Structure formats: structure tokens, C-alpha cells
Image: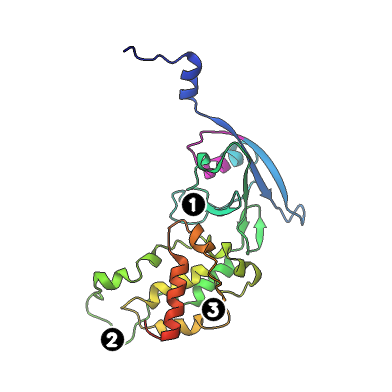
């Protein structure tokens, strides 16, 4: 059987698999206007590239004033969380081809936090909630002379919640957080869970008391938004329920 030969148009298409995509970005600059506006950009891009690549092309080639956060670009730092087509995602993990590039791709800042400029929000309230749950190992007694030993089974108990990268995708997808800025939020509870159930830690009761307050776990309405959007696949709602159960039974 003869090997099929591509014509010139097919060869060009294979060599340059670019498509034109419309990025519809929510812009806000407090030095210019108190109101946010939407701005469209046409971008020539390979559909196998990421939304972050498209934002880079816009900033570097069309409008250098476009402002957003990013760092590692590999889904580890969590700094480029934003709402893409109405859903919280990491721009560096979202492929163009997976979000219907035939229609405008909407990009806007995550909700529930004050927008500073374009896609950048004030993360301080989010990190304050994280700090409030004491996300560090608390121990009593004398310092050990060697590392603190932990069995694989004990480690497995909180393995899921060690994956959090503090991107705020879960917290900023929570309607309770949108309407009540005092709520600690899913990410803070996840990071409390990571230490509450750590067999080496002695601060579980202190954290449970913090989470038992008006702004703690009882504000959760089990909507599952947080679990659905977590880029690390953490069962966030399950972790919150486990903390609630620990509060009721006082068994860690």
C-alpha cells in the first residue's frame, strides 16, 4: 500500500498548528478607573499550550500593562490561580484545547478577595486564615535525640492534606467565603487537618478550639466547590468533615 502524501496545505498545518483564540480578560486599574472592564485580545497559539502561555503572549507582545501573578509555571507554587471560563483553575495547568477555544476564553481574578489590579488580588486575608490555625508542628517535652519516628499508617492518615500549595482556589470558590470574609475557609482547615491528625503533633486540641469558633468549620455548608476545583486533587470537603467529626467526638 502506498504511503499517503500530504499536500502543501496539510504540511503547513502540521508544521504550524496554531489557531486564533480570543482571550476576554477582566481588567482593573484603580489608578485609571474605579470600575472593572472586559478587554478582548486575539492570540495566535498552539491549542496544546496553556492559558498561562496565552497570557504571556498578550503581556509580552500586545499589552505590557496586563498584570497577573505566576512563578514556577508547573502547578507547584499555586500563584497563578484565577477564574477561567467561570471556574477556578491554575493558568499553568489549563490547556487551551481543553476549554473550548472556539469561543472566547474568559479570564478574571478569583472571587472573595479584594482585586488590586487586573488578575491580582490581595492574598493577605487568605494567608491570615492560614496563620490562624497554627500550621506548624507543636510538640511538648524534651527535644528528641533523633528524628521523630512515624509509621507509614500514621503518615497515611493525613497524607492527602499535605498536598496543599496555598493557591486559594478552594477558598475563593466557596460562597460562604465570598459573603463572610471572617470565615477561615477550606484551605486553612485543610492545613489545620494536616497537623491535627499528625501523630507527632501535640497541638491538635488548640487547633480544634480555633476551628470550633464562629468562623471555623461549622460555617461550611458542604457545597463541594472546594473539592471540585482543587488543582492537587485534595478531598477538601472530606477533610473538613473529618475535623467536624473530631470536634464532636474529641477523638483525633
Q: Residue at x 71, y 47 (%)?
A: 38
Residue 143 magenta = no
In this picture, is 109 found above or below 102?
below
Q: Which residue is mark 1?
A: 71
Give the crowd class for mark 2: few <14, some 14-19, many >=20 residues within 10 Å.
few
In this picture, is 121 found above or below 138?
above
In this picture, is 134 found above or below 10?
below
Dot label at residue 81: none
Q: Residue furthest top?
A: 2
Q: Check the picture and name the quadrant holding the C terminus.
A: bottom left
Name the element at disc 1: loop
The answer to whether one can see residue 135 in this image is no
- Residue 205 drawn at (x, y percent): 42, 85
Give the crowd class for mark 1: few <14, some 14-19, many >=20 residues within 10 Å.
few
Residue 45 magenta = yes
Tell me which label, 1 or 2, sits earlier in the chain: 1
Report the colour scheme.
Answer: rainbow
Magenta stretch: give its range: 43-56
Q: Is residue 120 left or right of residue 166?
A: right
- Residue 207 drawn at (x, y percent): 45, 81
Q: Residue at x 22, y 79 (%)?
A: 145
Tell me which label, 3 or 1, sits earlier in the chain: 1
Q: Which residue is mark 3?
A: 218
Q: Which residue is mark 2?
A: 142
Cα–Cα span, label 3 and label 2: 36 Å
The answer to whether one can see residue 78 in this image is yes
Give 213 or 71, whichever is nearer the viewer: 213
Name the element at disc 2: loop
Q: Residue furthest bottom?
A: 141
Q: Check the picture and name the quadrant holding the N terminus.
A: top left
Give 127 or 7, whichever is nearer the viewer: 7
Image quadrant assignment for residue 202 = bottom left
Amino acid at each position: 500500500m502506498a504511503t499517503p502524501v500530504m499536500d502543501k496545505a496539510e504540511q503547513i498545518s502540521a508544521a504550524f498548528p496554531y489557531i486564533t483564540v480570543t482571550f476576554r480578560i477582566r481588567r482593573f486599574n484603580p489608578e485609571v478607573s474605579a470600575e472593572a472592564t472586559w478587554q478582548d485580545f486575539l492570540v495566535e497559539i498552539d491549542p496544546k499550550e496553556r492559558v498561562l502561555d496565552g497570557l504571556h503572549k498578550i503581556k509580552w507582545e500586545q499589552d505590557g500593562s496586563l498584570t497577573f501573578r505566576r512563578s514556577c509555571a508547573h502547578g507547584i507554587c499555586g500563584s497563578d490561580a484565577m477564574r477561567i471560563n467561570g471556574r477556578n483553575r491554575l493558568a499553568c495547568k489549563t490547556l487551551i484545547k481543553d476549554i473550548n477555544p472556539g469561543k472566547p476564553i474568559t479570564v478574571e481574578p478569583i472571587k472573595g478577595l479584594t482585586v488590586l489590579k487586573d488578575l491580582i488580588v490581595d492574598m493577605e486575608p487568605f494567608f491570615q486564615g492560614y496563620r490562624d490555625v497554627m500550621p506548624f508542628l507543636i510538640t511538648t517535652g524534651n527535644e528528641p535525640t533523633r528524628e521523630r519516628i512515624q509509621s507509614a499508617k500514621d503518615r497515611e492518615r493525613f497524607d492527602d492534606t499535605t498536598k496543599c500549595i496555598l493557591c486559594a482556589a478552594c477558598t475563593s470558590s466557596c460562597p460562604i467565603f465570598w459573603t463572610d470574609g471572617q470565615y477561615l475557609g477550606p484551605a486553612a482547615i485543610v492545613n489545620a487537618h494536616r497537623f491535627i491528625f499528625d501523630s507527632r503533633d501535640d497541638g491538635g486540641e488548640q487547633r480544634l478550639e480555633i476551628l470550633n469558633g464562629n468562623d471555623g468549620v461549622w460555617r461550611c455548608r458542604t457545597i463541594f466547590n472546594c473539592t471540585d476545583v482543587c488543582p492537587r486533587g485534595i478531598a477538601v470537603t472530606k477533610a473538613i468533615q473529618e475535623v467536624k467529626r473530631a470536634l464532636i467526638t474529641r477523638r483525633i
